[in-house]
Image: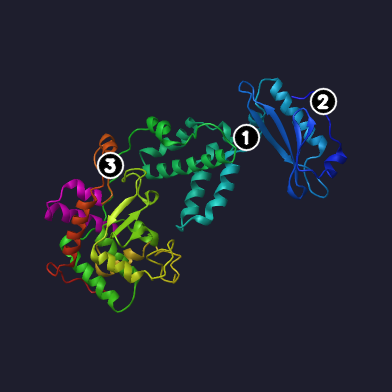
Amino acid sequence: MARQLHKLSARAVETTTKQGYHSDGGGLYLLVGTEGRRSWAFIYRQRGTGKRRELGLGTAKWKDRDGLTLSDARRKAEQSRAAIRAGKEPDTERKAAALAGTTFGEFADAFLESIKAGFKGKNSHADWKRDLEVRAAPIRPRTLQDITTPDVLAIISPLWLTINRTARETRSRLERVFDAAKAQGLRSGENPALWRGNLKPLLPKAPKSKRHHKAAPYKDVPGIVAALRTKHSGADTAVNRAAEFIILTAVRTSEARFMRAREINFKEALWTIPAERMKSEDHPEGRPHEVPLSARAIAILRAVMPKDLAPDAYVFAGQWSKDHKKPLGMNAVLHALQKVYPDMTTHGCRSSFRDWAGDETSFPREVAEMALAHKVGDDVEQAYRRGTALKKRRELMEAWGRYVEGESNVLKLAATG
């Protein structure tokens, strides 16, 4: 580090036009860029490694532009030199100073405001607000850097065995807030709301709640499909076609609602659902799910997709979304199904398929489970099972399609109204 200090003058800072680094001594530099833009930097050698480090100090005050004056920059440079003399890293010290004042509550409120435009559910904002204001109340006054895993555990533990789903959603939202804080340099170290290798070993295994969805006996499904076709034969309604498509593919409603045109491969008769849209607790993590499409499923897609549909457009568009920029409403398919069969839910369609596969076919259990995008086997088996049994699943789904198409077992359904 050069011994001579204060090489620059205030006038030089204002008038120099030569682009590049201009030394004031002691590691302080004025950076002059294109169109006269200028800023301050402190350059030093890292203790132990000797690596050159450059620490931005801020924009320089120049003409009518706000920024650091020469004396301001010299003061900051001296703070950095003092940190080096004390055996500390200037960049780390500066970040620590920034971390000191920001509370979880301040940051969480600002973060929620920044992401709310992306919420799709009508209750999403209220749910986030409840978790970050009410459930996280004990940590809101605490600075971000001071919050630890035990603090998050104290929030999650009371909910874990009684309302587990709420506990998991709260933990996930806290994790996202801490990730964002770290990305903005307001927190360092491990995320205290992280699940794997952090909270997971500290919480008991929660019992799985058995939610029974209303499902039609599989012998009624051909009649349900016939009724849906009757309803949309007189009007081009995407919702009835979507309901039939969900029955044919045995997927979750959300997976079909948010299907994008780019996910469909008509040549291979294959739909690939991105991993991030799969239900994580059921589906192997990090894997997309491939859905083989029967001839009727392909016909439905061709019927609802305009030829010039953009790759990012939704396949099943909302009622008033002619440009396919908005998906079907959350309960639209459910209402369509219940108009033709009141004791039916969209998730129940999957149960009907699974019962049929078990009772009426000789396909292995594993193939039926993989068709539903369920994990097969324990973690060890999952680690070794890389195949997706696509060929066998295609045969299964084609058999299901033929069954659904069959004219036998078609029941007389309740009046549709």
Instruction: Report the mark closest to the observer, 2 or 1.
Output: 2
Q: Is residue 280 within the magenta segment?
A: no
The quarter of the image holding the N terminus is: top right
Looking at the image, the residue that sits furthest to the front is: 18
For residue 99, which numbered disc appears in the image? 1
Helix, strand or loop at label 3? It is loop
In this rendering, does residue 407 appear at all? yes
- 3D distance between C-alphas at marks 1 and 3: 44 Å
| Pointer 1 with pointer 3, Cβ within 8 A | no
Residue in the image at 28% along x and 42% along y: 386
Badge 3 density bin: few <14, some 14–19, many ≥20, Cα 10 Å? few
Q: Mark 2 is on which residue type?
A: Gln
**How many numbered tags mark residues here?**
3
Instruction: Report the mark closest to the observer, 1 or 3.
Output: 3
Q: Is residue 330 above or below residue 38?
A: below
Badge 2 is on which residue? Answer: 4
Badge 2 density bin: few <14, some 14–19, many ≥20, Cα 10 Å? few
| Pointer 3 with pointer 2, Cβ within 8 A | no
Residue in the image at 30% along x and 53% along y: 290
The quarter of the image holding the C terminus is: bottom left
The answer to which image quadrant residue 282 occupies is top left
Mark 2 or 1 closer to N-term? Answer: 2
Q: Mark 3 is on which residue type?
A: Arg
Badge 3 is on which residue? Answer: 386
Query: x%, y% of residue 331?
Result: 36, 63
The answer to which image quadrant residue 97 occupies is top right
Query: x%, y% of residue 92?
Result: 63, 29
Range of the magenta residues? 344-371
Mark 1 or 3 closer to N-term? Answer: 1
